[in-house]
Amino acid sequence: MNGVNGSVIRRLCQPPVIGDRQTKKTGDPVGLCSRGLSSFVSLVESVFRETFVSAQNSSEELTMFSISRDFSFSYGHRLLNYSGKCQHPHGHNAKVRITIASEKLDEHHMVVDFVRLKSVIGGWIDNHLDHRMILAKEDPLVEVLKKMGEPVFLVNENPTAETLAKLVFDIVQKQGFPVQKVDFWETRKCFACYSAE
Ligand SMILES: [Zn+2]
């Protein structure tokens, strides 16, 4: 990279040669213009070539492998300070797509073993989110449901698809997986995405 960039810099620092001493001596204005144009075209071509090669090298350096796995679970929620159907307690059958990315593969030539992802993340979702009411921590329903012995999962913000996409992203990251993004389908047609990019 340094060599290529250095080469580009050097080429850019050299002004195009317009004519030469021999041409000037002959006083040939046509020769002057044609040589100057030729040098300029050559300069542009070389800069373009070096830039293109440099871009290709950068692209190679950014090559990433990624894998994705889908999970599904059912949950209930409601939105506070919101006017619409979602202000009332209701449920969804959610789908979550977790994408893990890595520049290198492990000894098994995997980004991460699907089985391990299912065990760790699928297990966490089953134990904490599946068939739970997911509510904002200040929701008055929390105390009511707790008194009834119902399982609730609390979040700091309104439990929207965006909030839950970030929640799952943070959990996957805390478990040590190099998560790239999480897509969270609240319904079949509506999903939110949270990514590291
Ligand atoms: Zn909803």
Image: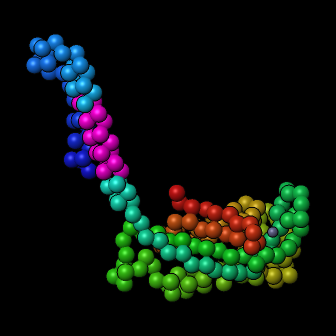
Which sits in the foreground, 63 or 22? 22
Q: Position of residue 117 (x, y in %)?
A: 52, 81
Horizontal side of 160 relative to 193 (left or right) equals right
Q: Is residue 183 magenta?
A: no
Seen in the picture, residue 38 relative to 161 is either above or below; the reply is above
Seen in the picture, residue 71 relative to 52 is either above or below; the reply is below
Q: Position of residue 142 (x, y in %)?
A: 82, 71
- Residue at position x 46%, y 83% in the image: 113
Horizontal side of 47 relative to 177 (left or right) equals left
- Residue at position x 11%, y 13% in the image: 25
Q: Is residue 52 magenta?
A: yes
Q: Quadrant of ligand 1?
A: bottom right
Q: Main secondary structure of the magenta part?
A: helix
Quarter of the image holding residue 122?
Answer: bottom right
Horizontal side of 146 relative to 169 (left or right) equals right
- Residue 143 in sight: no
Quarter of the image holding residue 93?
Answer: bottom right
Seen in the picture, residue 41 relative to 65 is either above or below; the reply is above
Which segment is the magenta one?
39-55
Horizontal side of 145 relative to 52 (left or right) equals right
Which sits in the foreground, 122 or 197? 197
- Residue at position x 82%, y 76% in the image: 91
Which sits in the foreground, 46 or 109? 46
Quarter of the image holding residue 20?
Answer: top left
Seen in the picture, residue 82 relative to 116 is either above or below; the reply is above
* Snapshot colouring: rainbow
Q: Position of residue 186 (x, y in %)?
A: 74, 70
How many numbered discs, if any?
0
- Residue 79 in sight: yes
Q: Position of residue 114 (x, y in %)?
A: 50, 83
